[in-house]
Amino acid sequence: MTEFVLDFERPVIELEKKILSLKVSAEHSKIDFSGEIADLEEKKEKLKKEIYGSLTSWQRVQLARHPNRPYTMDYIKIICENFVELHGDRAYGDDMALVCGLAAIDNSPVAVIGHQKGRTVHENMERNFAMAHPEGYRKAMRLMKTAEKFNRPIITFIDTSGAYPGIAAEERGQAEAIARNLRDMSVLKVPVISIVIGEGGSGGALGIGVANKVLMLENSYYSVISPEGCAAILFRDAAKAKEAAEALKITAKDLLKNKVIDEIIKEPVGGAHMDAVETAMNIKRAVNKYLSEYSKMSKENIARDRYEKFRAMGVFEEEIETKSLKKPVKNKKNTVKTGRK
């Protein structure tokens, strides 16, 4: 992997370079620098905890987009056994932006679906930067229906800036494909567990994210729009993405507080790209925990659990319009609070 350094990471990188330089000097000059190296190592660990323990929303967005961050296929290779990829939507073609297949986790059969980015320019062109076309969402639903038929739990990995907004995608029914997935996922009779592993952008993410449990990696984000898009619309300046990221409340901590997600999965200090195996094992533990819970539930209760989860999101009030006044009654007595959250 190529070296990629974010601005807030530079102090840590500089210390690591000093430590490496001292180790090389000690090896060639036979001088003992162990004391100096130990001091720098201690300073580095303290600095890492300070920096990564108080990241802003925008800094977490930057980590979510880190080019060395593990992608769906990286996690599948670590977590799953016997993965067999399935292709095509049986209507138009195969969308490489979404990976779909059958696998096992600790010998338990599952269906796995996830957005897949590329490491190189060629791979990103092939994967369309993980921005799926309608055939991608139809392929995903084809696998979900197959999983339901054979009683396999569904695991989805979300990592996209959004569904592809191009003319060809619109001509082939992008909005309809996503809407159909939202409808059909809501009534699936098998458990669905979604993990936001990087970017969780708009309907492109939600198209495979109507789940019984929605989990997020510590340094991922989940939002109706990207910070840059929000800044361009609200502030008329995409450069104000930092301010937009704070206002949107898109981090895992914010979303857990607002009960949009169910759990935050820890990452190694510095981000998932620092240790893909450790991150994958953290994901695996969380997935196995919820799969164990849902294995004891009936199919009807699994579908009801998902319905009630999304029905409980948000707080709203309804005002009753009386026939005599032809306008909403303002007094509290006639204001109906649903009690739904």
Image (spheres, grey):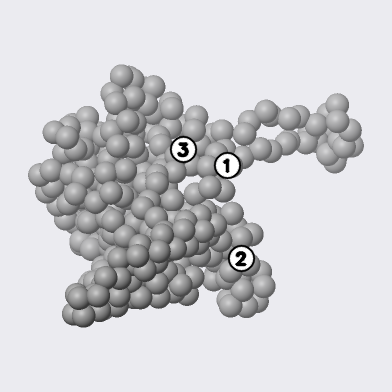
Sequence-wise, the earlier of marks 1 and 2 is: 2
For disc 3, the neighbor class at 10 Å (few under 14, some 14 to 19, many from 20) is some
Residue 296, x across and y down, in percent: 31, 19
What element does badge 1 sit on? helix
Residue 59, x across and y down, in percent: 50, 65
Residue placed most toward the observer, 106 or 186: 106
Q: Say whether marks 2 and 3 touch (CB < 8 Å).
A: no
**Residue 9: quadrant of the picture:** bottom left
Residue 323, x across and y down, in percent: 84, 33
How far apart marks 2 and 3 lie (CA) works out to: 24 Å
What element does badge 2 sit on? helix
Quarter of the image that includes the C terminus: top right
The type of residue carrying mark 1 is Lys
Label number found at residue 257: 1
How far apart marks 3 and 1 lie (CA) works out to: 9 Å
Residue at the disc numbered 2? 244
Task: State whether residue 138 appears in this view.
Answer: no
